[in-house]
Image (cartoon, helix red, strand yellow):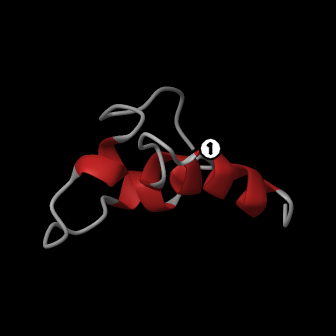
Amino acid sequence: MKEGCLYWFGFLSQKEKTESVPPECVECNKVVECMLNKENSEHALSEIRKWY
């Protein structure tokens, strides 16, 4: 992964569902957190982190 994000943290949670996920995002180690970066998603993130 390159240093820094070309978009912003939370971009994947805000993009249109019809838009494809950029290749940089697929390779990012924070892709899941970025996709779930919405209000009220802390519980979901804590559950996912249990598996990593």
Say few, some or many: other residues with alpha carbon within 10 Å of mark 1 (under 14 / 14 to 19 / 20 or more).
Answer: few
Q: Circle 1 — which element?
A: helix
Asked whether 15 or 44 is in front, the reply is: 44
Which residue in the structure is indicated by mark 1?
A: 42
- The image shows residue 19, relative to residue 29, as above or below, that is below
**In percent of the image, x 56 and y 57: which residue is there?**
32
Left or right for 28, reference 25 = right
- The image shows residue 28, relative to residue 22, as above or below, that is above
**In percent of the image, x 84 and y 67: which residue is there?**
51
Location of residue 23 (image quadrant): bottom left
Percent x, y for residue 1? 57, 44
- The image shows residue 10, relative to residue 45, as above or below, that is above
Percent x, y for residue 24? 41, 52
**In percent of the image, x 21 and y 53: which residue is there?**
15
Percent x, y for residue 18? 13, 73
Q: Residue furthest bottom?
A: 18
Asked whether 17 or 47 is in front, the reply is: 47
Left or right for 33, reference 11 = right
Q: Amino acid at mark 1?
A: Glu
Left or right for 50, reference 28 = right
Left or right for 52, reference 41 = right
Image quadrant occupied by the C terminus: bottom right
Q: How many marks?
A: 1
**In percent of the image, x 63 and y 57: which residue is there?**
44
Percent x, y for residue 16? 15, 61
- The image shows residue 45, relative to residue 6, as above or below, that is below
